[in-house]
Every structure is written in structure tokens, then in C-alpha cells.
Amino acid sequence: MFTGIIEEQGTVQELVRRENLYVLSVKADKVVAGTNNGDSIAINGVCLTVTGRKGKILSFDLMKETLQATTLCDLKAGACVNLERAMKADSRFGGHFVTGHVDGVGTIERIIQLPNYVEFEIFPPKKFMRYLVAKGSVTLDGISLTVGRVKKQSITVYLIPATLRITNFGKKKMGDKINVETDILARYLLR
């Protein structure tokens, strides 16, 4: 379980294809502290298990389902990724409940940038629009955000300058694909 409060941006070292899986290697500074094999780390909102650690480089195995349901298969060496360690039960809880089980891939359709103001219009997968409500929570590339507006096929989120600095959203462009996880509480309520 995660909170959607990004701890740092890591840098992809490589994504190597192996038989029936890919191995992702990411360089990080903060999240390596105290991290061991078997620990969970969210990379762009995708819950992954640490399978190796060498200095500041963490390795993760990506199965076929993960590659098909997320944007991780498109990562290249040098790409910046959002990183968050699994939450501790005895810590302050910011953001919202984030499972790291991405619902699907959305697209950034529009970006409006003004001084100290950035607005993103996102087209999530259509079948998940029913779980998205104004003032509700959504996770985009691992970031806990509040939905500003909801239209028939899109949502709008607003990012403060600090979020743009701390996360990879400061580098996003129109047309970029992003991982979308709807609020688990909304899913349970509707179910």
C-alpha cells in the first residue's frame, strides 16, 4: 500500500528483456535507504518487488501483465520515474490509499501553463471514468491528485509548482501516456 506522495525521481538505467519477463534497473538516492530484496516500491505508480540491489541501483522483474497494463514497457535508459516506498503502519498518512495496481494507461490531451499554475486534461481508459468524481482522488504515474473537473471522457487535475519539481510531471508533454489508478474506495462503493 502506498500514499501517492512521491519521495523522489529515479533514473532508469536499463530495461532488459529476458525469457518471459523484463528486468528494470533504476538508480535512486532516497528510496534505497533501508530497502531490501522483497520490498515493494511504486515506480510511476506500479507496485513492484525489489529483486536486486547494487549500490544505488535497484532491480525489478516485470511480468507480461505488468507490461501490458502500464507504461513501464516504454521506459528507456535515462527516463525519470516517480518513486515511493510502501507506507509504514506507524507513519503519518498523506495522499490517499494507493494500491499500486494500475487500472490502465491514460493520455495527456491538454496542458495549460501559467505562472505558478499548471492544468492537465487527462483521458483515462473509458471504462474507469465511472470511478472518477470531482474532488475525488486519482493516482497518475504514482502521484496522489485531486480531480478538479470531470467531463464525459476526461478529467482535469491541477499541479502546484512543488509537485512539478518533485515528480516527473514537470517533464510531461501533450500526448504522453500515464499510468492511471482510480480511487480504491470509489471502486468498492460502486461494486
Image: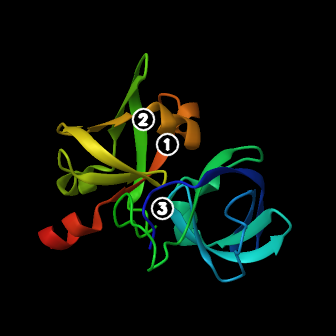
The answer to whether any part of residue 164 appears in the image is yes
Residue found farthest to the top: 114
Report the coloring of the rendering. Answer: rainbow
Q: Nearer the viewer, residue 182 or 113?
A: 113
In this rendering, would 129 be left or right of 158? left
Q: Nearer the viewer, residue 95 or 20?
A: 95
Indicate which disc residue 69 carries: 3
Q: Residues within 10 Å of mark 1 (few under 14, many from 20)?
A: many
Residue found farthest to the bottom: 38
**SS state under label 1:** strand
Q: Nearer the viewer, residue 105 or 60?
A: 60
In this rendering, would 53 be left or right of 49? right
Question: Whole-Å distance between the Cαs marked 1 and 2?
Answer: 6 Å
Q: Can you tell which quarter of the image residue 121 is in?
A: top left
Please state the horizontal and vertical placement of residue 54, each as a whole percent of the image: 86, 70
Question: Whole-Å distance between the Cαs marked 2 and 3?
Answer: 17 Å
Q: Nearer the viewer, mark 2 or mark 3?
A: 2
Identify the residue shown where x is 70% and y is 75%.
35
Q: Residues within 10 Å of mark 2 (few under 14, many from 20)?
A: many
Q: Is residue 157 above or below residue 23?
A: above
Amino acid type assigned to the residue bearing label 3 in the image: Ala
Amino acid type assigned to the residue bearing label 2 in the image: Ile
According to the picture, the residue beneath numbered tag 1 turns out to be 177
According to the picture, the residue beneath numbered tag 2 turns out to be 108
Question: Whole-Å distance between the Cαs marked 1 and 3?
Answer: 12 Å
Q: Is residue 154 above or below residue 70?
A: above
Residue found farthest to the right: 55
